[in-house]
Amino acid sequence: MQAKATGQLAKTDAIDAKMLAHFADAIRPQVREISDERSRQLDELVQRRRQLSDMITAEKNRLRNKTTSVQSDINEHIEWLEKRLKEIESQIHEAIAIDENWKHKMKLLTTVTGVGEVVAITLIASLPELGELSHKSISYLVGVAPLNRDSGKFHGKRRIWGGRAKVRSVLYMATLVAVRFNPVIKAFYERLLQKGKLKKVALTACMHKLLIFLNAMMKNNQAWQPPILN
């Protein structure tokens, strides 16, 4: 699209390279480190754990209104999936245990009420930039920063979109716990509801707030210290 926009219709490796160089010079995208092999392996294990968990849930849902013979087959499959899930979880814990940096991050992240093992491991594996970027950049990266949709006199509702869906998914689950049991996030959530915000909007704002807290913790290498919310 960039090449066509500049009037360049032909396509060769040399032209592609020139267009990419022009894009890099004009946009100046932030340079990010390529994940090392161990980090990629951990991320793959975390993804596989989520897949197995989803399959178990799907199979359990299929048990409803099935004949005895089919139920038996489904139960056998669930048993096998649960065994594989435990094996994958064991591999994940072993990977975390032998890496001092990951162990330290786990310890810090799980000091936050609402952030359990699964959430912490997913953040370590799938959001290695946590603590390395500004609060705005990390919010855009995950996809929890409300974005404007305005054109001329039209002012659309601010919505979140894009980003890393798997990170946003676990962050959402952490937020559901936090709005009930984390005093700081709970107070923030209730304040938004009192202002007339819809529950979905308030939860999204809490996700954003929780991510900012976690990013600051990682950046400052500090355990959870409840801040004062304005």
Image: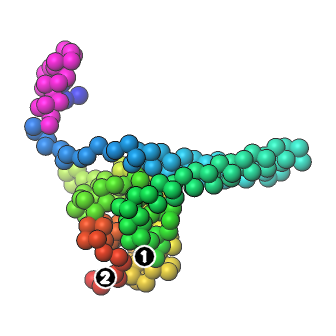
Q: Which of the image's four quarters has the C terminus? A: bottom left
Determine whether label 2 and label 1 are within 8 Å by CB: no
Q: Which residue is mark 2?
A: 227
Percent position (x, y) of residue 54?
61, 50
Percent position (x, y) of residue 72?
85, 47
Height in image: 181 above or below 119? Answer: below
Q: Quick one: 45 or 30, which is closer to the camera?
A: 45
Q: Which residue is mark 1?
A: 111
The tag on residue 137 is none
**Image coloring type:** rainbow
Left/right of residue 124 with respect to residue 20 in the rendered view: right
Q: Residue at x 25, y 59 (%)?
A: 132
Q: Quick one: 180 or 39, which is closer to the camera?
A: 39
Q: Amino acid at mark 2?
A: Pro
Q: Secondary structure at mark 2?
A: loop
Q: Residue at x 38, y 62 (%)?
A: 100
Q: Nearer the viewer, mark 2 or mark 1?
A: 1
Left/right of residue 17 with respect to residue 203 in the rendered view: left
Left/right of residue 187 with respect to residue 84 in the rendered view: left
Q: Residue at x 10, y 39 (%)?
A: 26
Q: Secondary structure at mark 1?
A: loop
Q: Is 19 part of what is drawn in magenta?
A: yes
- Residue 114 visible to an observer of this rendering: yes
- Please provide the residue range marked out in magenta: 4-24
Q: Residue at x 62, y 51 (%)?
A: 87
Percent position (x, y) of residue 31?
20, 45
**Labels in figure, total:** 2
